[in-house]
Image: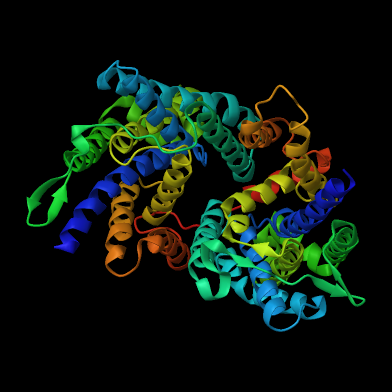
Amino acid sequence: MEAYLLNLGVLVSIYAILAVTLNFIMGYAGIFSLAHAVFFGVGAYVGAQVGMHFSASLIVTIPAAMAVSAVLSLMLALPALRVRGEYFVAASLGLQMLAVTVFSEWKGMTGGIGGLIGIPAVRMFGEDIYRPAAFFPLAAGAAILVLIVTRLLVRSSLGRSLTAIRDSESAAESFGKNVALIKTISVVVSAALAAVAGVLYANYLSFINVESFTLDTSVLVMAMVIIGGTGTALGPIVGAALLLLLPGMLSYLWFLPQTQIGAIQQIIYGLGMAVLMIFRPGGLVGRSGARRRTRKAGGGK
Amino acid sequence: MLWLQLTLTGLQTGALYALTAVGFSLIFGATRVFHFAHGAAFVLAAYVFYWVDTAGLGMIPGIVLAALAAMAFGVAMDRLVYAPIQRHEGSFFTVFVASFGVGIAVQNIVGMVFGRGFVTMNSTLSRSREIVDGVYVAPLAWIAIACAAVFFALLQFFLRRTHTGMALRALADSPELIRVYGLDPRRLSSYAFALGSVLVVPGAVITALGSGLNPALGHHVMLISLAATIVGGIGSIGGALVAGFVLGLAENLALIFFQSQWTEAVTFAILFLVILLRPSGLFGRAAAH
């Protein structure tokens, strides 16, 4: 039971990193990306390859993964500068679908559909860290660190410029803000931090394949952000915890057929998203003020 | 003769994409609702048809019930989901998420009822015949292409020659003027949803008879018709039709150069490039900004 909870804690921490970093561009910059799992995957694959061939130390793997992810995120920044709204969603969707094909076909790098096995565990203080009890503090620490970094950025002048751009791009531009640069930086930061989650994920499971980095994952992370509350500090974490606890909680409901748990879970979160958008578009954590801001976020053209 | 074979298969695939994309584009053009659950209407129609036909009631009742199911779903989405969101000035973002959520739910409900695996139907229509040396075409391919042509012509006639059709086109430009003119924008919006959703039926039925069904199909169809809508230019139903055919052909002709795993990537590479280079689409009027 304890191992189960710790394992869940590790996964919640890893997904919380993804949700927090997606919220950074979604909630504050109005960049609505369906390609977040791409950077999760890039982080995982780079972390795994570096760990297997050079060094399993996080001081090496994390910067490498962040750097590669940051460079690749320019592919997402490019359409973000050109288009908004539905066009950007479609562009990010295109990127996500392309990435899945590359993940499953570039066998030398990703191991193809079979994935990569035997990824070395993280070594810290002369010990391999792979047990949930040891890994949980590491993952939770990383999640808290990522949260603090994004919080600081949101409160910095960059964050204020981001919200200004989100609410009115032309107004921000007329105040002398370099819209293109600010948007690019926010996408790069978000993708680089998402790669951290990928590295941890690969090290923890010691096995990865493309299944973890598909559109479904992007949607799941998006659902975490939205259900928790877009543009709030704690919303994404609440959302991540809630959606990852759901399967466990459902398995306690004895009257549900066990083979259908996966489907029931998807139905609940699908309908949850729809109902929430009708009655409380700001998410569970969102206040009424936040709600108004979020609504503006996607509306601008 | 490989290219001829692939062109014909491409036209068949393209016809299915084209009609679904035209439906999506019609709904988006008239109501500005980004109806991502359009793929769910496709899956519902396909499975209703499958269910009625395998129950031994025949194809025609199957098609009629499939059309009713698609229409009912579209109108219900408009009335129960989009209308309440729009009442509090819902943005693109809010509408999209709600629609996406319903799409996920429908896919899984269908999966629970009919199973998540592939189901296929036995039909002589899907049996391929050799038309030229080494080129095989099933009767279904001709039906698909004919359906695309006939339904598109009917739709154009409706939009240009009938009172309701013209009102639908006006709704895209100005809901306020529609109200001033004495028409009800809400009712017109439901018409747009009914009409757009019915357009999935030919594609759904032909897919059920041809390559078979699985619940995840709606997702795939939606992604493709979304790509076709944007490549063709949002709001241009003629553009969506052409782009549907272009994507169907590209997906199949890509097989000459790439292995089959890469065909989907070709579609989305086209989508990505079009958004970057020509965001208003091939036939679009308004720019994306």
Point 52% across, 61% down: residue: A113
- Depth check, front residue: A85 or A239: A239
Quarter-of-image position of residue A77: bottom right
- Depth check, front residue: A234 or B213: B213
Instruction: Tell me if B114 is positioned left or right of A238 in this view.
Output: left
| Res A29 seen here | yes
Instruction: Tell me if A227 is positioned left or right of A135 in this view.
Output: left
The x and y percentages for residue A2 are 90, 46
| Res A291 seen here | no
Point 76% across, 75% down: residue: A62
Q: Quadrant of the N terminus of chain A?
A: top right
**Vertically, is A3 above or below B177?**
below
Outermost residue toward the bottom in this view:
A54
The x and y percentages for residue B271 are 43, 60
Instruction: Tell me if B253 is positioned left or right of A252 in this view.
Output: left
Outermost residue toward the top in this view:
B57
**Vertically, is A137 above or below B190?**
below
**Vertically, is A226 above or below A42?**
above
The x and y percentages for residue B282 are 35, 59
Point 28% across, 39% down: residue: B210
Q: Coloring scheme of the render?
A: rainbow
The x and y percentages for residue A95 are 53, 62
Quarter-of-image position of residue A178: bottom right
Tally of numbered tags: 0
